[in-house]
Image (cartoon, rainbow, N blue to C red):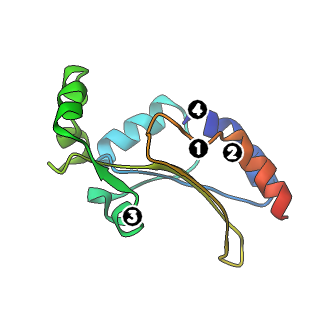
Amino acid sequence: MEALQEVYGQVLGLGGSFIAISPQLSKYTQQVVKKNNLTFPVLVDADNGYAEKLGLTFPLPEKLKEVYKGFGIDLERFNGNNSWKLPMSGRFIIASDGIIRSTEVHPDHTIRPEPKEIVDLLKSIA
């Protein structure tokens, strides 16, 4: 999230805006916002409802649940449900006319789109 904050001013300067969306409960999302001094909106996708509609969620296998729990990551507590589903990380560039100009989605949550590419993409569609 810190890297997103670093490009936020440039995105605004190009006439763009962006939001982040998280399945975490509001209290945990707000902790992330405060900890990282984020100035852009971070929305809560309760129960991954929006991500689910877009086909962007996946359930964690039992073995991976145990790994997460071993690291103290309790998705039931953080997300407020027992689904153990996560959204795929991704980026969507939507032009002011509502047309999606670029997407990048990864099923591996450790692979994230590079925030600095947002600026280049905005320049290319301007």
Type of amino acid under label 2: Tyr
Q: Neighbour class for label 4 at 10 Å: few (<14), some, many (≥20)?
A: some
Name the side, left or right, on which 52 lies relative to 117: left
Task: Name the residue tied to disc 2.
Answer: 8
Q: Is residue 33 above or below residue 97?
A: above
Q: Are marks 1 and 2 in contact (CB under 8 Å)?
A: yes
First-in-chain label (4 vs 2): 4
Mark 4–mark 2 Cα distance, whole angstroms, equals 10 Å
Name the side, left or right, on which 126 lies relative to 38: right
Mark 4–mark 3 Cα distance, whole angstroms, equals 27 Å
Task: Name the residue tied to disc 3.
Answer: 55
> Which residue appears at 39% of the width and 41% of the height?
30
First-in-chain label (3 vs 2): 2
As drawn, the residue found furthest toward the bottom would be 97
Type of amino acid under label 3: Gly
Q: Neighbour class for label 3 at 10 Å: few (<14), some, many (≥20)?
A: few
Q: Is residue 22 above or below residue 2?
A: below
Mark 1–mark 2 Cα distance, whole angstroms, equals 8 Å
Which of the 4 quarters of the picture holds residue 48? Answer: bottom left
First-in-chain label (4 vs 1): 4
Q: Quadrant of the N terminus?
A: top right
Task: Name the residue tied to disc 1.
Answer: 39
- Provide residue 110's location: percent of width, then percent of height: 47, 34
Name the side, left or right, on which 18 lies relative to 77: right
- Provide residue 89's location: percent of width, then percent of height: 48, 47
Name the foreground residue: 32 vs 95: 95
Q: Are marks 3 and 2 in contact (CB under 8 Å)?
A: no
Q: Quadrant of the C terminus?
A: bottom right
Type of amino acid under label 4: Glu
Which of the 4 quarters of the picture holds residue 116? Answer: top right
Point out which mark residue 2 bears. 4
First-in-chain label (3 vs 1): 1
